[in-house]
Every structure is written in structure tokens, then in C-alpha cells.
């Protein structure tokens, strides 16, 4: 499905009927990646899964979004659909956006329950090697931005950013790269204690993108929360054990 609003053209999945569950994607994915989760739920709930601005068939925003901007997008999107109450499931970046939403003092809709799967939102302390790499990148960045160098090698900065960035960063547009920088440097740890809804954490035991230690921090900070760890799973933990994921969601959402 599709709607136009606030200068953005948004593609989304809207399937099933009953109480609403909003599913928010991880960075670099689309809503369709989560068909396995949607299929677990759409027989008992109305599942709405938008492609975030800048992903899938949704148009790219005109400026670099922060997590708060993505949260504002979700608010606007749900208002357009006239949603007054919803539960939320978020994977990775989608989880970070849910944390931004659920920690707000006011929302135009109520949140019933929350599921965070391998969620982003906590900024790890950087290792010495990573700090050194960042310093080296900054020195190189200054060098390639000098007038003579920039004139002789106009693509140098772009190549440098691709070399030092992640695969997601390298494949993103300039605006989405700026957004990534904002997102990965914003720590939502202080906001976790303000989440006052029942929260389920589902995590891959071997997740390297958002390590299990982050899940334990979230569990300790979010008052009404519980953690399920999926053995031998990585950052897409729900795919590694669909049967366990289904049992856990069925118990949490009581269907």
C-alpha cells in the first residue's frame, strides 16, 4: 500500500484485522524482509509495516533524519491511518525508533506492548583501535577537503567515506550517510527508564551488531521487561529460530 504526506511517498504493508501491531524495520532493509514475522501475527492482529523514508519504495527525506525525526515520522504516519492504540515490534534501527517514541511524555496514541529484537539504541565504548581509525579518518578527511586536493580529486571524499564506513554506509546516499552518523552516535540509554509499557527483548546470542550486553543493559533499565536469548543466532535472531520466536510472541501477545 502507499500514501503521500508531508512531501514523502510512503510504501507500507497493512494486513490482517483486530488490535494493531506496528512493525518497524532495521536499517538497510524493507518491510518485506519481515514477512515471516508478519505471517505469525496477521491471523490475529492488524499488522502495519511501513518502509521508513529512504528505504524500499518510500521516498528519501530531504534532510538527514535523527532517531527523533524517524519517531516523528511514525507519529505522523499513524495519525494519517487514524491509529489510536498499537503495540510495536522493532528490529535493530526500528527498535531504536521505538525507544525514542516510548520514552516521550506525550504521544497522540497509546502503546500497549513493545518487542525489541536485536535493538539498536545503546552506544558502545569505542576500542583503542576504533578510536585510532576514527582519528586517522578525520585527518584524511581534512586533507581531501583542502582546495587544491578537492579540485584535483573531486571524488576523493566519497571514496574515503566508503573505505572507512560500513557496508550499509558505503551503499547509502549522502543524506542517508549523514543520518547514519547521527543515529549511531546517539545513546538512548538514559531514555530506557522512561519506558513504562511491558517490553519483550529478543536477542541473538552471537549478535555482533548490537551485542547481547546491550540487551542486558536494556533489561536492567526498562522497568517491566524480560529477555529471551536465541542460541547461536546473530543480528537477525528471529530468522534463526522461527519456531521459538513464534512461541515467545504468542505468549507475550496472548493469542
Image (spheres, rainbow, N blue to C red):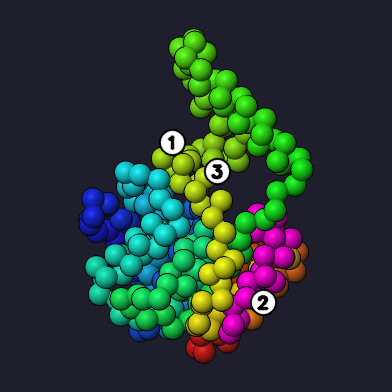
Q: Earlier in the sequence, mark 3 or mark 2?
A: 3
Q: Which residue is mark 2?
A: 220
Mark in front: 1 vs 3: 1
Q: Is residue 86 left or right of residue 77?
A: right
Q: Nearer the viewer, residue 164 or 130?
A: 130
Task: Quadrant for residue 231, please give it.
Answer: bottom right
Please tell me which residue is depicted at 49% across the width and 10% down the height of the picture: 148
Q: Mark 2 and mark 3 in contact (Cβ < 8 Å)? A: no
Q: Nearer the viewer, residue 59 or 35?
A: 59
The residues bearing labels 1 and 3 have C-alpha atoms spaced at a distance of 12 Å
Q: Secondary structure at mark 1?
A: helix
Q: How many marks?
A: 3
Mark in front: 3 vs 2: 2
Please tell me which residue is depicted at 40% across the width and 50% down the height of the picture: 65
Residues in magenta, as a range: 206-225
Q: Which mark is residue 174?
A: 1
Amino acid at each position: 500500500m502507499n500514501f503521500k504526506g508531508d512531501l514523502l511517498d510512503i510504501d507500507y504493508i497493512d494486513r490482517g484485522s483486530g488490535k494493531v501491531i506496528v512493525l518497524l524495520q532495521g536499517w538497510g532493509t524493507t518491510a518485506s524482509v519481515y514477512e515471516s514475522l508478519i505471517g505469525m501475527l496477521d491471523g490475529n492482529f492488524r499488522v502495519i509495516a511501513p518502509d521508513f523514508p529512504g528505504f524500499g519504495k518510500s521516498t528519501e527525506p530531504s534532510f538527514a533524519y535523527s532517531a527523533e525525526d524517524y519517531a516523528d515520522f511514525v507519529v505522523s504516519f499513524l495519525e494519517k491511518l487514524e491509529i489510536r492504540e498499537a503495540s510495536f515490534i522493532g528490529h535493530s534501527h526500528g527498535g531504536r525508533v521505538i525507544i525514542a517514541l516510548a520514552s516521550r511524555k506525550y504521544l497522540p496514541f497509546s502503546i500497549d506492548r513493545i518487542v525489541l529484537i536485536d535493538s539498536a539504541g545503546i552506544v558502545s565504548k569505542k576500542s583503542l583501535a576504533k578510536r585510532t581509525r576514527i582519528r586517522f579518518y578525520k585527518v584524511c578527511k581534512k586533507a581531501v577537503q583542502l582546495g587544491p586536493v578537492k579540485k584535483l580529486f573531486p571524488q576523493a571524499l566519497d571514496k574515503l567515506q566508503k573505505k572507512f564506513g560500513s557496508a550499509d554506509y558505503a551503499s547509502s546516499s549522502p543524506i542517508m550517510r549523514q543520518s547514519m552518523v547521527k543515529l549511531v552516535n546517539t545513546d538512548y540509554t538514559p531514555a530506557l527508564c522512561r519506558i513504562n509499557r511491558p517490553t519483550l527483548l529478543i536477542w541473538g546470542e552471537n549478535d555482533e551488531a548490537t551485542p547481547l550486553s546491550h540487551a542486558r543493559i536494556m533489561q536492567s533499565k526498562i522497568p517491566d521487561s524480560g529477555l529471551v536469548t536465541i542460541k547461536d543466532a546473530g543480528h537477525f535472531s528471529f530468522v534463526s529460530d522461527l519456531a521459538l520466536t513464534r512461541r515467545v510472541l504468542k505468549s507475550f501477545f496472548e493469542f
